Image (tube, rainbow, N blue to C red):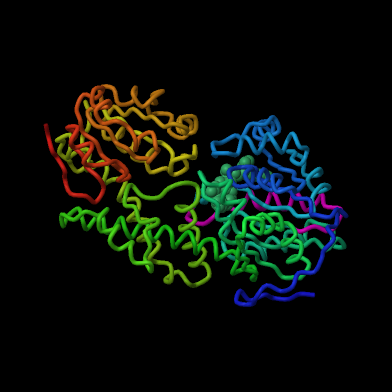
Amino acid sequence: MTIPYPSSQPLPAIGAVTPPSGGARPRLAFLGTGYLGATYAICFAELGYEVLGFDVDEAKIAKLAGGAVPFHEPGLDELLRRNLAAGRLRFTTSYKETADFADVHFICVGTPQRADGMGADLVYVEAAVTGLAQHLTRKALIVGKSTVPVGTAEWIEQLVGKHAPADLGVEVAWSPEFLQEGFAVEDVLRPNRIVIGVKTEWANAMLYAAHKGVFDLAATEDREVPLVVTDFATAELVKVAANAFLATKISFINAMAEVCEVAGGDVTQLARAIGYDPRIGNRFLQAGVGFGGGCLPKDIRAFQARAQELGAGEALRFLHEVDLINLRRRTRVLTLAAELLDRRSGPAGPDLSGTRIAVLGATFKPNSDDVRDAPSLAVAGLLAKAGADVRVYDPEGMENARIAQPDLTYEPSMADAVRGADLVCVLTEWADFRNADPNAIGELVAARRVIDGRNCLDASLWTHAGWEYRGMGRPERTIRH
Ligand SMILES: NC(=O)c1ccc[n+]([C@@H]2O[C@H](COP(=O)([O-])OP(=O)(O)OC[C@H]3O[C@@H](n4cnc5c(N)ncnc54)[C@H](O)[C@@H]3O)[C@@H](O)[C@H]2O)c1
C-alpha cells in the first residue's frame, strides 16, 4: 500500500518487520565510505548492527579493513578497530557481496558541484544505484543519504525499476544527513533529529528498524530523538534548506563585519549583543573568512540551480548574495595584508612580493583534515598569487592540502611556518593556534603583525605582546610597546 506521510502527521505506529535476510535486525550497507559513509558504517556497527561498507576506491577500503580511518575524525579510529575485532563490521569493493549482504543500502557517495555549472553532479549516485540494483536478488530498501537536488529520489526509483529485477519489489527512501565533521561520531550516535522520506509502510518500518539502535541509545540516556516522517521531496529539501539557512546566517554576520569595517564598529561585540536574543541565538554568528568545506558552498549553488530548473529561481536569488559575501571575505584578508605590510594596491590587486607570510590553517574548520573549498587555502593561494612567500601549516590537513594546492610551501610545524614571517594569518581556529603564546611566537617572526581571520585570538593579549593585530570586522588595535 502506498501512503504519503505529510510532515505534520505524527509518527504512525510501526509494526514489526522482518528483514528480507531473515535476521532480527536489518543488515546495513553503506555505499561510499568517505567522511559520511565510513562514519556511519562504523557508528552503526557500534550500535550493534551487522554492517558492510562498500566503496569503489580500493585503497580506501583496504585501509578501513586494516583498521585505519582514511581521514581525521576524533574518536573514529578506536570505534573502527573495536567493531572490526567484534566481527560486526566489514568492508568490500564488490557490488555483488553488498547486494547479497544487506537489507538496507544507504547511498553515501559524493555529489560534488558539476564542472560545467552550479548544479550537483549525480554520476556517482547513478553508478552506485545501478551497480547495486542489478546484483540484488531479494527485496531491499535503498536509502539516499547524500545531499542531492530535490527530485533525485523519484529518479532513483526509476533507475531501480530499470536495473533491479522487477519481481523483487525493491523500494527507495530518503534520509538526509546533518553530521558535522569534527563532531561526526557524536552527531551520528546522538543526532538532534532523524528525517525520513518514505512512500510505504514497509519502507517506514525498515528505516525505523535500521535506526532503532539510535532510539534505544537515546532511551538509555533519558533523551528523545525527534523523528520527522515525510515525503521524498520534503526529505530532500530539508537538507539543502538547513544548509542554506546556516550559510545565510554566516554571511549575514560577515555582511555586518563589512559594515563594521567602514563604520568603525566591532562585529564580535555586535554578534554577542544580538546573539543574546533567543530568536537569533549566538551559534554560527562568528564573523571571519567565511564558510567552506565539501558541503555548504556546493549545496547552496546546487539548490539555486535546481530551484531555477523548477521555476522558483527568484525565491533563492538571495543565496547568490550569500555566496558573494562569503567569497568577498577571502579577498578582504588580502587587502588587510596589504594594509598591514604597507603595500599599495594597483588595478591587479596588491603587490606582496618580497614579503613572507605564515598561514596557520589549511582545513575548512578545526578537528578535520578536510580541505575542500577551504577559505584558508584559498586565501593562501591569493597571497601567493600577489607575490608573497607563503608558508602554510595545519595540524591535520597537510597531506590533503599538498594534493589540493601543490604550489604552496608547507612547513612541518607552527614554529617553522612563522619563523621569519612579516605577517602571520590565522585562518582556521585550531586550538593550537587559539592557545598559542604571542610572546613565544613573537620571538620567531620578523615582525609582529597578525591577521585573525577567525576572530579566535585574544586581541588584547596579542596587542599587549606588541603585535599589530587585525581581526575581521573589528577596529584597528595597535598598541605598540
Ligand atoms: N562530509 C560531511 O560532513 C557531510 C555531511 C552531510 C552530508 N554530506 C553529503 O554526503 C555525501 C558524501 O560526502 P562525503 O563528505 O562523505 O564525500 P567523500 O568524497 O568523502 O566520499 C564519497 C565517497 O564515495 C565514493 N564513491 C564514488 N563513487 C562510488 C560508487 N559508485 N560506489 C561507491 N562509492 C563510491 C568515493 O570513492 C568516496 O570514498 C555528499 O553528498 C555530501 O554532500 C556530507
Give the magenta-colored segment's residue range: 117-141
Count of marks, rendered view: 0
Tell me where residue 466 appears, x and y as whole percent. Answer: 17, 32
Rendered image quadrant of residue 75: top right
Nearer to us in this view, 428 or 2: 428
Q: Is residue 274 left or right of residue 294?
A: left
Query: In the shown orientation, is residue 175 left or right of residue 419?
Result: right
Q: Where is the C terminus found, in terms of image quarters?
A: top left
User: Percent position (x, y) of residue 325?
Assistant: 32, 56
Q: Quadrant of the N terminus?
A: bottom right
Residue 182 at x, y percent in the picture: 50, 44
Q: Does the magenta segment cover residue 140?
A: yes
In front here: 151 or 469?
Answer: 469
Residue at the spot 33% in from the left edge and 47% down from the top edge: 289
Task: Look at the image and say whether residue 185 sits in the magenta stretch.
Answer: no
Indicate the position of residue 368 as horizontal and vertical percent values: 49, 39
Q: Nearer the viewer, residue 63 or 436?
A: 436
Q: Residue at x 58, y 43 (%)?
A: 35
Look at 63% across and 48% down and name the residue there.
109
Visible residue check, residue 111: no
Residue 388 seen in render: yes
Residue at image position (68%, 40%) is 56
In the displayed structure, 343 sits above or below 272; it is above
Furthest-left residue in this view: 481
Quadrant position of residue 205: bottom right
Judge left or right: residue 342 versus residue 396.
left
The part of the image, by quadrant, that contains residue 464 is top left
